[in-house]
Amino acid sequence: MRRLAVVVALAAAGLAWPGSADARSGPCLIPGSTLRCALWTAKVVYIADGDTFYADLRGDGSRRIYTVRITGINAMEQTVYSAHAWQRRGYCHSLEATSRLEGLISRGGGIVRLAALDASSASHRRWRRAVAVKIKGRWRDVGRLLVSEGHALWLPNGEEWAWNAPYSLLAERAAAAHRGLWNTTYCGTGPSDAVPLRLTVNDDQPEWVRIRNLDPVRSVNLGGWTLGDSTPSRYTLPDWATVTPGETLTIRIGKGSDTWTELFWARKNVFDNLGPAAKGVGDGAYLFDPQGDLRAWMTYPCRLACTDPYAGVLQLSADAQGRESVTVRNAGAATVDLDGYRLTSPPYVYAFGIGTTLGPGEELAVDTQGDPDEDSRLEKHWGRATPILNDGRDVVRLTNLRGVPIACVAIGSGAC
């Protein structure tokens, strides 16, 4: 109870807000960037978990304590908080993240450098700040270390955008090396460990996530597994949710009635859309088994090894006059599966459905108007009520769901 009272008191104190005049200006400490940030120096007084701590701001003339949420990362959640490591409890990976943060801050003598593009940037009334500690005379970015070591997920945001692209690249490198969170058996032997799963997410409306069982003979029961994005928000799959060999389970973000092949999260939206490249905004979908192992995921946009086997194989053409349509042609020697791919003609997006395949030399037409219920194997309908292509100037692109370009067609004076 005493520890709880301390945390509550600190949290209440953290609601106080200093003016931007309390900040100085300096480099943001982002490799390759000349951006300047508002800067503060603070003394850490309590570490809550792997991405949040409480600190006393230096030079503000008060003893107020501020809650600091580290920019750009999300560590796994703790359930019991304590200044003593042996008393902490939490989900798999949470205690490791807290311990690593604690160690880094300790090496810096408890002093941290806080940085923000916007001095008023906040997350649920907590300061949203990039955090650095001085180790051996050099400032080290704490969020960068935690993400690159696999202690935290990349958590992009539109305010403190300068850390989005570098942190997402670090997360992909950590995933490729199977560090920390990205080690699918880190938390121990779990259900159906040997069954390979593929996860894809469509961030545009209607949002959905697809989980495909790639095993040719074994089913996987997903009861009690959790699905989420880069934030702590999670959806728990029902006990009976099962994916048979080679089949797919779709989780739709909106409301509806659950079936054996479709589940509904009953949320309006979950996944952030791909934003302007300059701000690096994106998101990810993550599937955890009941013991906390991250078993399947997809992040976007792609920043590491961004190639696709269908680039140069699929060709695109478009008719913007009369009955508008976009045609995809398979110029390769093998059948292609378009599940996981989409057409974009901003602001419009069309994601191909499950089982959309093209044999060698085949063409598939996507009419921009018409009823998708009337789809056939080689003719699909975008479902728009009115024409969407500008015959004077437009561009249609074929990409995978991570944004990797496959093919492009320019209309009129448009340019790919």
Image: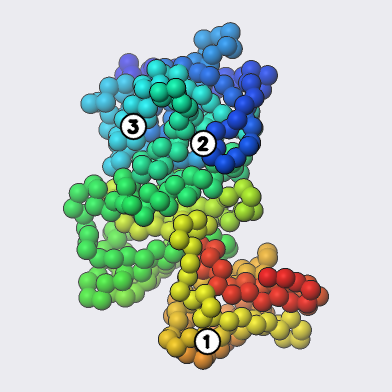
Q: Quadrant of residue 32?
A: top right
The front one of 199 and 114 is 114
For disc 1, the marked residue is: 331
Residue pictured at 37% horizontal, 52% vertical: 175
Question: As shown in the figure, which amino acid type bears the numbered disc 1?
Answer: Ala
The picture places residue 35, in percent across and down from the top left corner, at 64, 36
Q: Provide the residue designation for mark 3.
A: 100
Q: Do the residues labelled 1 and 3 touch (CB within 8 Å)?
A: no
State the residue lying farthest toward the right: 392
The first of marks 1 and 2 along the sequence is 2
Q: Which of marks 1 and 3 is in front?
A: 1
Q: Which of marks 1 and 3 is nearer the N terminus?
A: 3
The amino acid type, in three-letter code, at marker 3 is Arg
Left or right of 342? Residue 220 is left
Residue under the image location 32 percent in, 47 percent down: 179
Residue 18: % across, % down = 62, 19
Determine the residue positioned at 40% across, 43% down: 148
Q: What percent of the width, then of the height, locates residue 265?
A: 45, 57
**Residue position for label 2:** 71
The answer for how far apart the CA atoms under marks 1 and 2 are is: 45 Å
Q: Nearer the viewer, mark 1 or mark 2?
A: 1
- Disc 1: CA contacts within 10 A as few (<14), some (14-19) or many (>=20): some
Residue 226 spot, x, y in % from top left:
35, 53
